Amino acid sequence: MGEITILGETGFAARYAAALYALAFEQNSLDQIVDEMAALGRLIAESEDLRRYIGTPLTDAAKAAPVIDGILAGQGFSTLLRHFVGVAVTNRRLRHLPALIAGFAAYVARKRGEMVADIASANPLSDVQRTQLRARLTEAGYSNVKLNERVDPALLGGLILKVGPRIYDTSLRSRLQRLNYSLKGAA
């Protein structure tokens, strides 16, 4: 069985999540690390340069480690989080950092009895959009939901929402693909 893509029960992201959770719990800093991991996810989502740097598969781990640590230190992240990211970088998991963040969020949510909603959007969600999305999820019967957001400019607009086994795709990319298929069928 291979590595997980993002939120599976097994694989490297699950192992990293369990290790960070246990260490943060042991150091009585679990809530702080949960908040910092969410903040790191937002930092990556909001910075195109950082996303590009992290996503480059040829980034040298020895050169990336001090760069990433400097960014995290400058943003005021704790030593524990910086060491966690440092281990990920050393183990050549830098480009998988968003998956590690998502895996940690899912692990924490599962431990707390929450459900995780994965949201991919073309642009970062505003606070108003986030509130509206939570309200819609509550109406749909998902009252205790943790939002796991990521930015995917390839969607062009709209979003893709995954809650449990259900996927809701309102992205412009999917709409254009459906239109393309229907036009090919009409020809």
Image (cartoon, grey):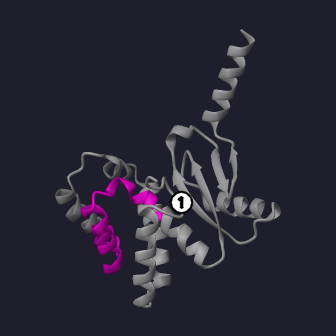
Question: In the current view of this chain or complex, which residue is farthest to the front?
Answer: 1
79 left or right, relative to 162: left
73 left or right, relative to 39: left
State which quadrant residue 11 falls in: bottom left
Image: 47 above or below 88: above
Q: Residue at x 28, y 62 (%)?
A: 89
**Mark 1 Cα shell of 10 Å, populated few (<14), some (14-19), many (≥20):** some
Residue 10 x, y percent position in the rendering: 49, 63
Q: Nearer the viewer, residue 38 or 76?
A: 38
User: Badge 1 is on which residue?
Assistant: 8
| Secondary structure under the numbered disc 1 in the rendered image | loop
Quadrant of image for the C terminus: top right
Residue 54 x, y percent position in the rendering: 33, 53
Q: How many labels sit on residues?
A: 1
Residue 3 x, y percent position in the rendering: 43, 55
Residue 99 located within the stretch drawn in magenta: yes
Question: In the current view of this chain or complex, which residue is farthest to the left?
Answer: 62
Q: Give the residue type that dot 1 points to.
A: Gly
Q: Nearer the viewer, residue 31 or 128?
A: 31
Image: 153 above or below 62: above
Image: 44 above or below 178: below
Q: Residue at x 40, y 76 (%)?
A: 19
Residue 94 x, y percent position in the rendering: 32, 57
Q: Nearer the viewer, residue 92 or 1?
A: 1
Q: Residue at x 49, y 64 (%)?
A: 103
Query: What's drawn in magenta, residue-wise?
Result: 72-101
Q: Residue at x 50, y 83 (%)?
A: 31
Q: Nearer the viewer, residue 18 or 61?
A: 18
- Predominant secondary structure, magenta span: helix
State which quadrant residue 61 falls in: bottom left
